[in-house]
Amino acid sequence: MGVRRLGIRRKPDRARLADASFRRYFRVTRGEDTYIVMDAPPEKESLGPFLSVAKILLGIGLNVPVVLAKIRSAAFCCCRT
C-alpha cells in the first residue's frame, strides 16, 4: 500500500487488533507516533459505516480514533488514537 514511503512501519511486537468483521487492524509507528490502520476487503466491508459510527460517537463526546487518511474504494483508513 506504500505506507513505507510515509515512514510508517508495522511493529512486529505489537498484537493485531480484531473485531467480528472482515476488518483487520494494525498498530504502526512513524517516528515516536503510534497509529491504527484499518484495512478490509472492499467487496466484503464498506468504509462508510465505520466512518459514520466514529463521527456519531465523537459527536456525543466519546473518545474515538481520529481518521487521518482514508481510501474509501479500498476500505482503508489510518487513525490516530
Image (cartoon, helix red, strand yellow):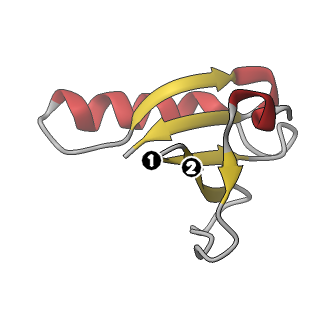
- The answer to whether 41 appears left or right of 31 in the picture is right
Q: Position of residue 65 (x, y in %)?
A: 37, 41
Name the quarter where the N terminus is drawn.
top right
Q: Label 2 neighbourhood size at 10 Å, few (<14), some (14-19), many (20+)?
A: some
Mark 1–mark 2 CB contact (< 8 Å):
yes
Secondary element at image label 2: strand
Seen at 74% across and 58% down, the residue is: 22
Q: Nearer the viewer, mark 1 or mark 2?
A: 1
Seen at 70% across and 35% down, the residue is: 76
Q: CA distance from mark 1 to mark 2?
A: 7 Å
Q: Is residue 24 in view?
A: no
Seen at 64% across and 58% down, the residue is: 26
Amino acid type shown at disc 1: Glu
In the image, residue 3 sits, relative to residue 32, either above or below, namely above
- The answer to whether 58 appears left or right of 8 in the picture is left
| Towards the viewer: 12 or 57 | 12
Q: Residue furthest left?
A: 61
Q: What residue is pinned by disc 1?
A: 32
In the image, residue 14 sits, relative to residue 51, either above or below, namely below
Q: What residue is pinned by disc 2?
A: 29
Q: Position of residue 40 (x, y in %)?
A: 76, 47
